[in-house]
Amino acid sequence: MTDDFEIRFCDCITALAPQTWNALAGADSPFLRHEFLRALEETGCADADSGWQPHHLLVTQRGRTVAAMPLYLKSHSWGEYVFDWSWADAYRRNGRRYYPKLVTSIPFTPSAGRRLLVVPDVDAQAVTRAVVAAVIREARSLGASSWHVLFPAVDEQARFSAAGLRPRIGCQYHWYNRGYASFEDFLATFSSRKRKNLRKERAAVHGAGIRFQHLDGHAITRSLWQIFHGFYQNTYEVRGQQGYLSLAFFEQLGRTMPENLLLVLALHEDTPIAAALSLRDDTTLYGRYWGSRDDYQFLHFETCYYQGIDYCIAHGLQHFDSGAQGEHKIQRGFEPIITYSNHWIADPQFDAAIGDFLLREAEHVRQYREEAAGLLPFRQDPAS
């Protein structure tokens, strides 16, 4: 029975104590930590003005908090990485409003992980059914067109699908540590030609006199944060855009969760020229934010990918989630994987049309993923 679940919505993450939220989140992902979500809200990166109005969901049972879910009321589709711009355009062309909508996700973070945080001794399926019913009621009361659960864990997407939310799949490229002793050990699994290509790329960067430092959050000074943020903003400015995340956000992460941060700093003649900021947990490196001052050949690949692989091997991490998109990752040993999302559409006609689209899209995504896997650089002989 789900009658004893009490569900409420709150407009800030501080409605739940950090220790309570983090106990629900566990050690699965640094993006689920109270500190990460709080930094987004307190620095204005995720608030009503930015179009990410927090509307988090909390579930109690007989006075005990048993589940929580990050939830946002959105006035646009920026920063989501599961693209529904065509859906919004279809609404507009039919004289309908697509926004506001509700979104369960980590803002600006295309990384899979749990989205409904449930204590182990409570039936997750029962909680899911109760939460789905509550969010749909809330969406209707708010006049929201839809609700979208982005990048849930595999078992979660199955529960959301069973509760009536339409499933959608996508594709990303991830690296897996197969017990490599070194980067050269990893390259030994490549075909000869692809192995030569990567060695040439690394040699070009190091031959240009560029060296790298790996700094955890404790070692990132205020001046380094300013340098990094300048690089990060430059990546957007060259496209005439503005970065989503502020210097204050990154500095707050440095204060509140330094053990989860890795800054790869590229230097030329002791002057910083590029940087990549990743987050990490006990098993996974999450490559997220990058920027540069100057354009050097292959610098992006070295800073964002090869240095990350080096770090994973040296620290025994099993998985490198390098973020959304980027077919160029395939030839560098990042494997195509399926990602998930779930969607509820209030309007029955649009729901039927989107459901038909998602079925056809899934066929193409699965076919693409299979073809992409055939382009991986690994040798096909048994020794590989």
Image (cartoon, grey):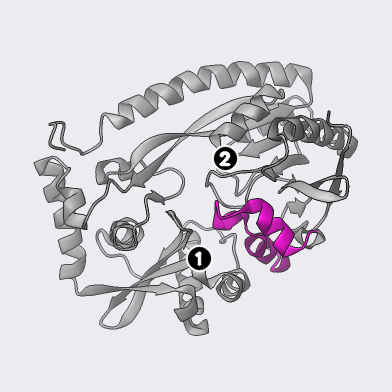
Residue 363 in sight: yes
Q: What number is the disc on residue 260?
A: 1
Residue shown at 70% from the left, 46% from the top: 119
Residue shown at 43% from the left, 62% from the top: 290
Q: Earlier in the sequence, mark 1 or mark 2?
A: 2
In the image, residue 27 lies in the stretch drawn in magenta? yes
Task: Give, as a three-letter code, the residue at label 1.
Answer: Asn
Q: Quadrant of residue 86?
A: top right
Figure check: 171 above or below 44: above
Residue 341 in sight: no
Figure check: 67 above or below 33: above
**Quick check: 70 left or right of 222?**
right
Task: Give, as a three-letter code, the residue at label 2.
Answer: Phe
> Residue 60: x and y, percent?
83, 46
Figure check: 248 above or below 337: below
> Residue 339: x and y, percent?
50, 35
Decide whether the magenta segment is chiefly helix, strand or loop.
helix
Circle 1 SS class: helix
Q: Residues within 10 Å of mark 1 (few under 14, many from 20)?
A: many
Residue shown at 52% from the left, 83% from the top: 222
Circle 2 SS class: loop
The stretch in magenta equals 16-44
The residue pinned by badge 2 equals: 151
Q: Quadrant of residue 354?
A: top right
Q: Nearer the viewer, residue 106 or 297?
A: 106
Q: Residue furthest front?
A: 121
